Amino acid sequence: MVGLTHVAFRELIRQFTPPNIKPLLFTEMLSTLRLPSERFDLADELQVSQLDRGRVTPQILGNDEDYIAKSLRKLEIIEPWGVDINMGCPVKKTLRHNWGVRLMGDKDFAGEVVAKVRRHYDGPLSVKLRCGIEVADLDFIKGFTEVLEKNGADWITIHARLKADKHKGLANWGLLRELKQFRKIPLIGNGDLQTADDAYALVKDYGLDGGMFGRAATARPWVLWQLAEKLGMSCERPEAALSDHPPKTPEEEGQYYLIAMETFAGLLDRYFQNEARKMRKFRFLVTTSHKWCVFGNSFYRRCMKIKTWSEMAPMIADYRASLSGFPMRSRISMLH
Ligand SMILES: Cc1cc2nc3c(=O)[nH]c(=O)nc-3n(C[C@H](O)[C@H](O)[C@H](O)COP(=O)(O)O)c2cc1C
């Protein structure tokens, strides 16, 4: 997610995930027009940690084979685990280049884009797309994903909202369940996954091969730990954990939220130098995540009032010390 899934956030997720479990984590979307000439040490979205090496999956935007090939070569520096092609982004800048969800308007061309990437990359290749453009239509998404599969995609992730929905509205998991029976390659569901129970249901009740958390992971970076326990996996204690088991009650989750925000501020210090950028990234994460907290508005306001970055960590520590019982909501409405 642009502005969110940078190196510090990926590290935050790892610090709240049992170290014996290796989550699939993605970069922000990366333009193949820019990648070939970009400097890895200067572009925030290209920063990687030692833990990312061999594990992170860059997500690319593109359709031109030459730029795709050069970008893939350039990305070898970060030792990607896999490569993901974005066919879901609805923002104007992306559409102008005939990337993102625009590719869903022409399935044959979308198939060619997969083939172009495949010719230059033989590792795990996925496509992230939406479940439709204007209307939910099983035949359309069946035909579209068939072309992706035929051209070399190893798995697909579907954001179960239409292009017209952008990031709002109910996710159509039912359509994914219907689609699943027609696909040989794994089908991962995304959209409105907010809790470990949601991800569990996506697999157990909807028959999908997995789930991809989006915005809820910014509020609940320990959600994979909760899911792993629910699945009965053996879980080593995560690095930033306060307890041997993941938070369960709304109050435990609220306490973990503030610890996670303190941890995140420290990780921004570790990976970024520029104060204004650290501030911007922190505020964006709080803007996205605070909605899950009953105390979210007051915490959000405090964060927005802070003027200099050095005041941020002490403010969070004070905030944490000044209150007792900060419940989190299990789910929030994503309708608006
Ligand atoms: C701020 C923001 C940035 C996003 N950037 C990307 C992106 O770069 N690539 C992508 O595939 N999806 C992107 N998305 C979409 C999410 O990956 C996800 O599909 C969407 O938020 C639905 O999942 P959710 O309802 O669980 O959040 C972005 C979403 C948001 C809110």
Image (cartoon, rainbow, N blue to C red):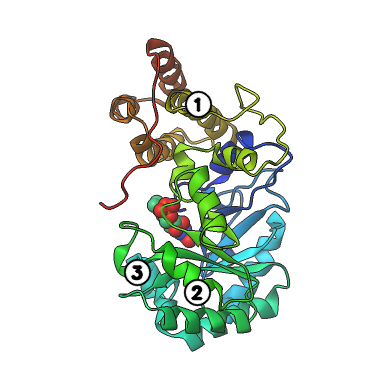
Q: Nearer the viewer, residue 21 or 318?
A: 21
- Tell me which amino acid carries mark 3: Lys
User: Residue flagged by tag 2: what amino acid is it?
Assistant: Leu
Which of 69 and 53 lies nearest the eye of the viewer?
53
Residue that label 2 marks: 179
Q: Are marks 2 and 1 in contact (CB under 8 Å)?
A: no
| CA–CA distance in space, label 2 to label 3 | 18 Å
Label 3 sits on residue: 163
Q: Relative to residue 182, is residue 4 drawn left or right?
A: left
- Residue that numbered label 1 is attached to: 256
Q: Nearer the viewer, mark 2 or mark 1?
A: 2
In this picture, residue 104 sits left or right of residue 239:
left
Of the numbered discs 2 and 3, the one sitting upstream in the chain is 3
Q: Position of residue 24 (x, y in %)?
A: 63, 52
- The numbered mark, 2 or 1, whose residue comes first in the sequence reads 2
Q: Does residue 64 show up?
A: no
